[in-house]
Image: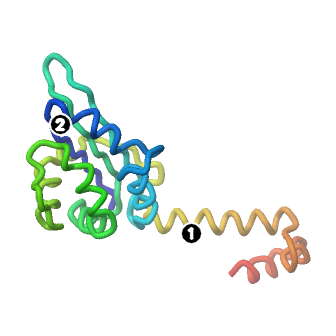
Amino acid sequence: MQTALTVVTRIPEGQVEPLRAELDPARAAAGASLLDRFAALPTLHFACLFIADATLDLPASMVFEASVDGATGDFLDLLLAIAGSELDAIYRYCADYPESAGRQIAKAYLLRHDFGAATFFAGCPGRSVGGIRRGAALLAALQDVIDGGTGAAANLAGDIMAAARAIR
């Protein structure tokens, strides 16, 4: 089951630019490291983190959106285990973020600010991230055989059953 979360947190006045610098992946900041951590999350389909600038009616906010396999609470547990220090470095600029946020306190903060999602795009409905990755690897292996492959695969291009056994 694919679910989505949308965490919206207020950014106090004077903290927008320091947060923007922290999120900049071109700098040696938490934002750059967080991108690497996202890649290590086996249940993450999509994520984005951005600053919504203040308007006449609304204060500046940071928005974290994610589409994940399974329950959002389980995803947050994994995210905080893998990227807790990066999240602390980023969320410290947001209103009411606890100064010494342990994993459970940080999780409660994120869940408290989760608006969920009324709708979200699912590019591969019903498929997990792992299933999508395995399918892509199988397709690449099949394409290698069809294209004549290299080494042993090159000799199998004419024999579909031998090619299937080689791929397995």
Residue at image point 13% right, 67% down: 104
Residue at image point 79% right, 66% down: 144
Amino acid of disc 1: Arg
Extreme-top residue of the structure: 56
- Could you say whether the residue bearing mark 2 is in a helix, strand or loop? loop
Q: Is residue 159 left or right of residue 106?
A: right
Residue 28, placed above or below residue 136: above
Percent from the top left, x then y, of residue 138?
Answer: 65, 69
Residue labelled with disc 2: 11
What separation in Å lies between label 1 and label 2 (alpha carbons)?
A: 40 Å
Residue at image point 72% right, 69% down: 141
Q: Nearer the viewer, residue 118 or 9?
A: 9
Q: Is residue 21 left or right of residue 118?
A: right
Residue labelled with disc 1: 134
Q: Nearer the viewer, residue 26 or 145?
A: 26
Disc 2 crowd, CA 10 A, few/some/many (<14, 14-19, 20+): many
Q: Nearer the viewer, mark 1 or mark 2?
A: 2
- Tell me the quarter of the image containing the N terminus: bottom left
- Could you say whether the residue bearing mark 1 is in a helix, strand or loop? helix
Residue 161, placed above or below residue 13: below
Percent from the top left, x then y, of residue 140?
Answer: 70, 64
Amino acid of disc 2: Ile
Residue 70, placed above or below residue 54: below
